Image (cartoon, rainbow, N blue to C red):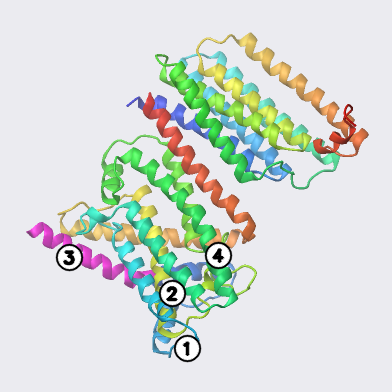
Amino acid sequence: MLGLDFDIAHMLAGGLVLVSFMMLYQVRLYALLHVLALHAFVLALSVSWQAYIQDAPHLYITAAIALVFKAAIVPWALRKMVFRLGIHREIENVVSVGLTMLGGMALVALSLEVMLPVTSGADPVAREDIALALSVVLIGLLMMVTRRNAVSQVVGFMSLENGIIFAATGARGMPLVVEISVAFSVLIAFIVIGIFLFRIRERFDTVDIGAMDQFRGGQQ
Amino acid sequence: MAVILESLLVQLFQMTIILALAPLLTGLVRKVKARLQRRRGPPLIQPYRDLRRLLGKEVVLADNASWLFRVAPYIIFAVTWVAAALIPTFATGLLFSWSGDLIAIAALLGSARFVQALAALDIGTSFGGIGSSRDLMIASLAEPAMVMIVFSVALIAGSTQLSTIAEHLLDAHVGLRVSLALALVALVIVALAENARIPVDNPATHLELTMVHEAMVLEYSGRHLAMIDLAAFLKLLLYVSMIGCIFVPFGMVHASARPLAYLIGGAAWLAKLAVAGVLLGIFEMSIAKMRVFRVPNFLGAALMLGLLGVLLLFVSRGM
């Protein structure tokens, strides 16, 4: 047995993967934003637990960034954006929810299969954190691939970034500078995407990515 | 010898008491729902009265009903009763606990469903056909989820036998397991689907667009209907007891304990049943019935939770 430290870290990591799956399951935009906030909240909990067991106080700052920016400000801004864009219907998926979830399961299995043998010999908490963080990243990518709506692609991007932060905190000794610059660049990306969303909307009267296909140049 | 005698007594007592209490649990759920709707609702013992009335009525059979249609209610009832008798409700030292295997219980319930679907198809009405095809669609999704739950519980406890699982979870230092929590949620979803409760099926409706279980038993009357109803009551009790036995095994009595311990175990079991009945009533009141086409997603979530639990267990065991 590895003790309670490992059990709690394992539970929080598993919870993060679970919330990623809840995102795949959600078909309503507002509910999706709530789940994104929950995702960041679980990330903050997990990072603060890492800070506690690694005895690394700077990770508390990471957790605070996750809590303030990703669990509160970003979902709130996205919510306002959805309101202003006037889209609060169900999201259209490219493939059905059941199939997406099966794909997600396969990705989790893949990342465990890849990561666990590679990291053998490392600290167990870091090993399983990295394995599960990779699956969070892959599920975020899957979300961006399977959703047509640009807003939900942003949500997928945000959850992907949460996965990267999660992987980084599991490994010991990541400098705070890297952490803050990642958070900052994501914020910039968020703003750029936000402006871009409104541009798409102005031009095509929709944020459905599928509508843009007919404007593609080339083989027409 | 004394041990065998005691386990036989406990087993017989359990078989009687589950049969006696099953209608009461359903009555409790109905009462809670009625009170939440600010109705007075039927008394708690109404299911017993319904059963007595149905047993006294004559059976109306369709002209083209074969022997299967007449035999099916008794098979369904007997199989469900046997499955319910295998679940350790208040004590683990049952005579048949060596066969109280989760996979065996799932197989017994599966055969009951098979017979029910056949009987519904037998008389050739369209409702029977709709009901059985929908029921089998739900079952084909619920059973893989059930198998995943069995896997994750068996990986933790090292056995698929319910009494061993209960004793392991009661005694050993299990720690904090996210897989168990996932398995609990998945098992609750499967139990809702299997018992035809509200997000999946409405037990109180006869609206042809939505009914699943009721469509299958629409042609039954008299004592046949009584048997099917009693089997449905038993199935609800079975799932509640199974969830209690795996996830909240507190108060369960070991084999060859003192009589006082049996009293405590029985009281704990009754308390679990009451809590589960009230929670089920509240849950059913607070959620709307799902469209039939959304049920696969709902059950897919159970399958996914079970699978995720198993994967996470492999991670923590591989360390």
Disc assigned to residue B9: 3
Q: Which of marks 2 and 4 is nearer the N terminus?
A: 4
Q: Earlier in the sequence, mark 1 or mark 2?
A: 1
The chain that hosts pointer 4 is B
**What residue is disc 4 on?**
B133
Q: Spatial distance from mark 2 to mark 4, Cα to Cα?
A: 20 Å
Dots 2 and 3 on the same chain: yes
Looking at the image, do the residues carrying marks 4 and 1 touch, with CB atoms under 8 Å apart?
no
The chain that hosts pointer 2 is B
Graded by Cα atoms within 10 Å as few (under 14), some (14 to 19) or many (20 or more), the crowding at tag 1 reads few
The chain that hosts pointer 1 is B
SS at mark 3?
helix
2 or 4: mark nearer the eye? 4
Residue, far front:
A219
**What residue is disc 2 on?**
B229
Q: Spatial distance from mark 1 to mark 2, Cα to Cα?
A: 16 Å
Which region shows up in magenta? B1-22
Looking at the image, do the residues carrying marks 1 and 2 touch, with CB atoms under 8 Å apart?
no
Residue type highlighted by circle 3: Leu
Residue type highlighted by circle 1: Val
Q: Where is residue B3 in the image (x, y as percent from the top left)?
A: 11, 57
**What residue is disc 1 on?**
B60
